[in-house]
């Protein structure tokens, strides 16, 4: 495979302290990762038996392609000769005064000493960029819109609009620890009209990214990769010192907007739970531009989680906001279809809880209060601030959607239950139950903290009895069947909060790669699989219904797929009934593995704010 051309990718060395103790890298501190900007040849995929792709190596095995990244700038394609800065040297903007320049130099020296001290100990895999952004998890440069892409097969006539998917794409080479979730947000967009397709990808211009681009390196703290133990405290101190001196401005948000996407009230919003949403506009050409941080016309004064829920009947957007420092640790609120915010409902929690997702039913919101919690004091004793609290009991809170306070919330315990994502929930009044569908993950904190036990994700049905306060949990797929990790996916969103039969979920094997997707019958446990093929991997399968009146599973699955043999990427469009590939769109550049997406149809785009 040819290395990247003389565009954005500059040859760079990862600081020696980022080397692992693995024999794979014992002879050199150079990091072998994969960064390329080659055109993609067409390769229509076929459904094959499930075992074929599962023989591919895990992301923990370092790929052989060379790592070339130093920094991805907005002007990368036009200024390839720019000299990279050293890892802890700030590019001082011209508007800084003498005292700010002197302070910046002093803080850079302190950070350099910190990095030197950190180099004495190997990084855990959950914070090692050699693991976290290896292979096709590595970042790519922005891609201006490219039209008339090659299409194999026929794109169904009912698909007209833009498929967008979010992901983590670090602008700069990590200085120290880095978790995949820490990367800057980048939106990838495929526009489809009359069977023709175009593609573009752009960074979401968060305040964090804009400031770090100006000073030429990362200075905002990385919540998962860096904030561990005493060095994490030191990094927070450095950041607050830079803020106090006016070298950075955290007052307008510190989030990365890399996880969720929702189209609501004529706006595409990119989200991560560490900030407010950012509005991203889709241009008529199919290109993308960031409008800015969106506070719903000054109504929103707090962060929002990355998975708000739009009720398909009322068109209201329901969401949560959590705080890891001060009470209230959790709030619930909603927005009407025209964007009017309800008052906050403070949910009483004894400690801040990691709450990435929740669920809605026709009348309720379902709030998971689980055993992965934030304990910042753990950093004082050298630990991680995100921990599994074995003394806490997992529970679900059932709250009326239109509640004005939490007085009537019903808590139902569900022992040892941790669902990173909830796929749907509905009410069954005849039994006084709320049924929740989610993937129960063990070990619960394995995404955040290194552990010896292999991750296991079990698709489960959890029944919460609102009258007795009891719960029942069962695996949906028969225990006699071969276990398969199912993570990332959805049900038909036209039926969100109502009883659904089918879920479309990523086959997360070999973890954390996705070798295909499964169509699961939630009533019978029957599983049908679509496997991408030998050394082909994708991400979240997005279900796009063909109409609002057809059968529940009438529609198509959209997913980006990357071929690790040819280093080429494509968009697959798969019939959700037959699981046959209807069309593939050849993409002009590599699409890294990412997070969540949505689809905006052409009619909705005409009303875009």
Image (spheres, rainbow, N blue to C red):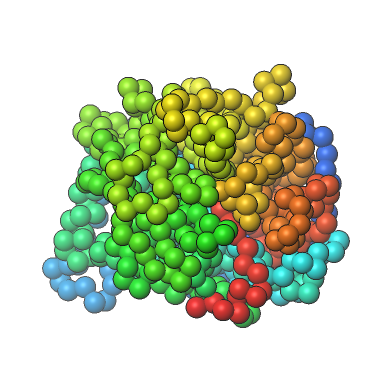
> Which residue appears farthest toward the left when viewing the image?
99
148 versus 118 height, above or below: below
> What residue is rendered at 52% in x and 58% in y?
310
Answer with left or right where residue 103 lies relative to residue 497.
left
> Which residue appears farthest toward the right when viewing the image?
153
372 versus 199 height, above or below: above
Answer with left or right where residue 157 lies relative to residue 374.
right
Count of numbered labels shown in the rendering: 0
Which of 8 and 543 lies nearest the eye of the viewer?
543
Asked whether the viewer can see residue 56, the reply is: no
Which of 219 and 530 lies nearest the eye of the viewer?
530
Answer with left or right where residue 513 lies relative to residue 547.
left
Which of 586 and 155 lies nearest the eye of the viewer?
155
250 versus 516 height, above or below: below
218 versus 417 height, above or below: below
> Which residue appears farthest toward the top when viewing the image?
480
Question: Where's residue 344, x and y in %?
Answer: 31, 56
> What residue is rendered at 81% in x and 64% in y?
156
> Which residue appears farthest toward the front when viewing the image?
430
């Amino acid at each position: 495979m040819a290395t990247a051309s003389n565009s954005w990718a500059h040859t760079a060395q990862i600081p020696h302290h980022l080397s692992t103790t693995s024999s794979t890298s014992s002879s050199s501190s150079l990091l072998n990762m994969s960064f390329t900007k080659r055109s993609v040849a067409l390769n229509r995929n076929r459904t094959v038996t499930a075992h074929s792709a599962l023989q591919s190596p895990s992301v923990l095995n370092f790929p052989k392609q060379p790592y070339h990244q130093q920094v991805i700038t907005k002007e990368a394609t036009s200024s390839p000769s720019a000299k990279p800065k050293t890892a802890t040297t700030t590019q001082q903007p011209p508007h800084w005064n003498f005292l700010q320049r002197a302070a910046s130099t002093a803080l850079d020296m302190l950070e350099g000493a910190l990095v030197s001290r950190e180099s004495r100990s190997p990084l855990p895999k959950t914070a090692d960029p050699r693991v976290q952004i290896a292979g096709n998890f590595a970042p790519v440069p922005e891609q201006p819109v490219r039209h008339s892409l090659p299409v194999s097969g026929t794109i169904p006539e009912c698909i007209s609009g833009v498929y967008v998917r979010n992901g983590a794409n670090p602008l700069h080479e990590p200085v120290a620890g880095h978790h995949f979730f820490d990367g800057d947000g980048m939106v990838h967009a495929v526009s489809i009209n009359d069977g023709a397709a175009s593609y573009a990808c752009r960074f979401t211009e968060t305040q964090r990214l804009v400031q770090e681009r100006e000073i030429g390196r990362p200075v905002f703290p990385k919540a998962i990769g860096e904030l561990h133990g005493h060095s994490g405290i030191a990094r927070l101190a450095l950041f607050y010192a830079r803020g106090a001196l006016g070298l950075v401005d955290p007052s307008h948000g510190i989030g990365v907007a890399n996880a969720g996407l929702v189209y609501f009230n004529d706006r595409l919003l990119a989200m991560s739970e560490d900030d407010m949403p950012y509005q991203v506009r889709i241009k008529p050409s199919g290109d993308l531009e960031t409008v800015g941080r969106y506070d719903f016309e000054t109504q929103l004064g707090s962060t929002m989680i990355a998975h708000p829920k739009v009720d398909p009947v009322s068109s209201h957007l329901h969401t949560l906001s959590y705080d890891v420092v001060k009470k209230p640790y959790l709030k619930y609120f909603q927005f009407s279809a025209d964007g009017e915010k309800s008052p906050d409902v403070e949910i009483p929690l004894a400690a801040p809880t990691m709450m990435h997702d929740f669920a809605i039913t026709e009348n309720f919101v379902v709030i998971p209060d689980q055993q992965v919690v934030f304990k910042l004091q753990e950093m004082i004793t050298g630990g991680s601030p995100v921990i599994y609290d074995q003394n806490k009991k997992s529970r679900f809170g059932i709250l009326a959607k239109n509640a004005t306070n939490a007085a009537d919330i019903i808590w139902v315990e569900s022992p040892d239950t941790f669902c990173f994502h909830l796929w749907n929930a509905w009410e069954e009044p005849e039994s006084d139950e709320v049924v929740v569908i989610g993937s129960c993950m063990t070990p619960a904190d394995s995404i955040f903290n290194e552990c010896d036990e292999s991750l296991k994700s079990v698709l489960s049905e959890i029944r919460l009895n609102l009258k007795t306060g009891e719960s029942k949990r069962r695996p949906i797929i028969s225990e006699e069947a071969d276990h398969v990790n199912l993570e990332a996916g959805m049900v038909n969103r036209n039926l969100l909060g109502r009883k659904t039969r089918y879920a479309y979920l990523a086959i997360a094997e070999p973890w954390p790669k996705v070798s295909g997707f499964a169509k699961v019958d939630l009533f019978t446990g029957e599983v049908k699989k679509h496997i991408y093929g030998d050394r082909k991997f994708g991400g979240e399968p997005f279900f796009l219904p063909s109409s609002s009146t057809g059968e529940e599973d009438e529609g198509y699955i959209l997913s980006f797929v990357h071929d690790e043999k040819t280093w080429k990427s494509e968009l697959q469009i798969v019939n959700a009934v037959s699981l046959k590939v209807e069309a593939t769109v050849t993409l002009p550049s590599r699409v890294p593995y990412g997070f969540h997406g949505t689809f905006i149809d052409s009619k909705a785009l005409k009303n875009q704010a």
